[in-house]
Image: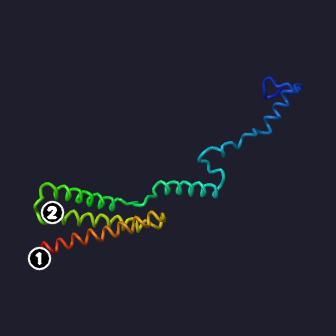
């Protein structure tokens, strides 16, 4: 009788043979790895769809009326600082100075105009009646305050 490679092999054991046949057919859950998150098993279209969903989610997070880049944020911070400092100095230290009301007016006009410009350039991302009304109001305030400040500067220089 020939020897087998496997210890404990009994060709007369039908239950063991059926178990070996079942194992040889394969695991029915062998493709479970495609169900895991981040798997690229679905192919190129699946990867492209996942990437577009990720980008859309990131874009939804970023969308605001005034979405500024770093340079615009720095300009905005400087204008806010100048406007607040100008208002504080107007009503405290330079109370009797004729040039005191001109500086906050001019900086508030520039700030409103700058915000209207930022909102106008970002309107392609998000359009709505609120944003349109906000941009128009900021533009009008920018024109009014800036013209008031410029007229005040001209009067100071002439007078």
Q: Which residue is mark 2?
A: 100
Q: Quadrant of the N terminus?
A: top right
Position of residue 47 relative to residue 124, above or below, is above
Residue name at image x 78 percent, y 24 percent: 7
Q: Position of residue 68 (x, y in %)?
A: 38, 60
Q: Foreground: 38 or 120? A: 120
Q: Foreground: 33 or 37? A: 37
Describe residue 87's horizontal placement relative to residue 70 as left or right: left
Q: Which residue is mark 1?
A: 158
Residue name at image x 19 percent, y 64 percent: 103
For label 2, the SS is loop
Residue name at image x 75 percent, y 38 percent: 27
Q: Foreground: 83 or 61? A: 83
Tag 2 or tag 1, which sits nearer the N-term? 2
Describe residue 8's horizontal placement relative to residue 65 as left or right: right
How far separated are the C-alphas under marks 1 and 2?
Answer: 16 Å
Q: Position of residue 20 (x, y in %)?
A: 81, 32
Position of residue 139 relative to residue 83, above or below, is below
């Amino acid at each position: 009788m020939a020897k087998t490679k496997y210890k404990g092999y009994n060709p007369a054991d039908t239950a063991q043979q059926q178990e070996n046949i079942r194992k040889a057919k394969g695991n029915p859950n062998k493709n479970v790895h495609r169900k895991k998150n981040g798997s690229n098993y679905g192919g190129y279209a699946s990867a492209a769809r996942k990437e577009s969903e990720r980008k859309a989610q990131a874009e939804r997070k970023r969308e605001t009326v005034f979405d500024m880049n770093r340079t615009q944020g720095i300009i905005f911070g400087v204008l806010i600082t100048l406007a607040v400092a100008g208002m504080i100095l107007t009503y405290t230290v330079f109370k009797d100075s004729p040039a005191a009301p001109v500086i906050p007016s001019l900086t508030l006009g520039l700030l409103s105009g700058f915000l209207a410009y930022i909102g106008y350039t970002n309107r392609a991302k998000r359009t709505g009646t609120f944003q349109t009304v906000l941009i128009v109001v900021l533009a009008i305030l920018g024109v009014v305050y800036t013209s008031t400040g410029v007229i005040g500067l001209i009067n100071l220089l002439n007078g």
